[in-house]
Image (tube, rainbow, N blue to C red):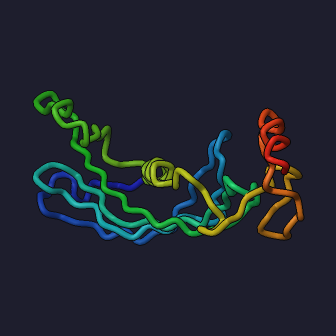
Amino acid sequence: MKLNLLPILNFDGKKIHIDEKVSVSPRHDDTFKICSPVEFDGTVQNVGGTIELCGTAAAWLNLICDRCGEEYETTLRFPINERFKKADEFSDVDDDPDISMLEGTSIDLDEIIYTNLFLNLPSKQLCSDDCKGLCPICGGNLNKTDCGCKSDTTDPRFDILDNLLGK
């Protein structure tokens, strides 16, 4: 979705409220699925010639648990704070790495939301905080059932010491 900035571009202090559901396109190598359009609520404002996009987004995601390998769904809420400055021959946006160059009179809200969503994904994706994971012996999901495998295995290199101790 292209967001037209013409109503605020040359008017310092002008603001536009945005309350949209944005369909974000998935990438071919994503490890997650976006289940529904991402909801964005925020503002875009001209502050001294700098366009500031601020708000909160909420995405319904389908992820794979890093411990048990099961799919689960969750809502990810994340802030979006982006700044843009119109590129002209007198401005030097290279001085501030937090300001992106504005080409034209619109910004691509889809790309901004996707980038911020990706950056806010949890580094460890867990279906629940108390996920038990997989059994290291049989590979069974310990959240669903207790497999009954003997978990007090020892290193076979220490078997001779166990024999000396009579175990």
Is residue 90 or residue 70 the one in the foreground? 70
Image point 22% across, 66% down: which residue?
15
Question: Residue 20: x percent and y percent?
Answer: 46, 69
Q: Relative to 5, does residue 29 appear above or below in the rendering?
A: above
The part of the image, by quadrant, that contains residue 101 is top left
Q: Is residue 8 left or right of residue 144?
A: left
Say whether residue 100 is left or right of residue 79: left
Taking 25 as reference, is 65 left or right? right
| Residue 124 position in % (x across, y down) | 56, 53
* Front-most of residues 50 and 68: 68
Q: Residue at x 18, y 49 (%)?
A: 50
Residue extending furthest toward the top = 89
- Residue at 31% x, 56% y: name it: 81
Q: Is residue 126 left or right of residue 45?
A: right
**Image label count:** 0
Q: Position of residue 25 (x, y in %)?
A: 60, 50
Seen at 24% across and 36% down, the residue is 97
Vertical relation: 160 (above or below) 43 = above
Nearest the viewer among 89 and 139 is 139
Q: Position of residue 67 (x, y in %)?
A: 69, 55
